[in-house]
Amino acid sequence: MDLITTPLDVWDYAFFAVLFTGVSCGLTLLVIILGLPGKIAVARNHPDAEAVHLMGWVGFMAVIPWIQALIWAFKPTDKIDIRRYPEAEAKATEEMIAKMRDDMKGGLRRRKPVAEPAKAPDAKPAKSEAAPGDQA
């Protein structure tokens, strides 16, 4: 049996085509299933949509985290961040959801670097900057 020198016939090429198609369909189905919790969370305007999305992708290594992400995507939340008022929290959630929708539609794009926050001006003027009439 000389397998290396055996010429390939039509059935061998048909097998390779079926194998390639099966693997491609399997990978496509896997990508759709792994992204499902994140897409559900974005569609439901979930405040933790980004975490649900990430947990859905990372959860494929063990099935339990993916199931938890799917349940979390459907769970209604009454979360209020105490660092912001409810209106600001709702606005921040809407901005995050809009950003995630853009990322899901157009793929990941290169992000602009985040600029450092500007320093607030000092409240007290320095002694050299005192008004001309103020002599101590």
Image (cartoon, rainbow, N blue to C red):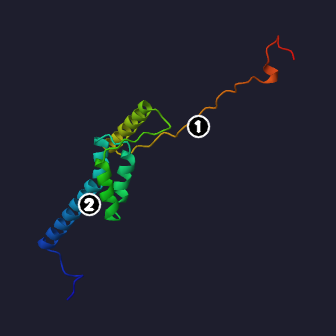
Can the viewer see residue 110 in this picture?
A: yes
The residue at 35%/50% (across/down) is: 53
Q: Residue furthest left?
A: 10
Q: Residue furthest bottom?
A: 1
Q: CA distance from mark 2 to mark 1?
A: 41 Å
The residue at 19%/62% (across/down) is: 21
- Taking depth in this image into account, of 127 and 88 the one nearest to the observer is 88
| Label number found at residue 18 | none
Image height check: is 97 above or below 36? Answer: above
- Taking depth in this image into account, of 136 and 63 the one nearest to the observer is 136
Q: Amino acid at mark 2?
A: Leu
Q: Secondary structure at mark 2?
A: helix
Left or right: 1 as drawn, with respect to 108? left
Q: Which residue is mark 2?
A: 27
Q: Which residue is mark 1?
A: 116
How many neighbours does mark 1 have within 10 angstroms: few (below 14), some (14-19), or many (20 or more)?
A: few
Can the viewer see residue 39 in this picture?
A: no
Residue 117 percent location from the top left of the image: 58, 34
The residue at 79%/14% (across/down) is: 131
- Taking depth in this image into account, of 77 and 56 the one nearest to the observer is 77
The residue at 39%/37% (across/down) is: 93
Mark 2 or mark 1: which comes first in sequence?
2
Q: Secondary structure at mark 1?
A: loop
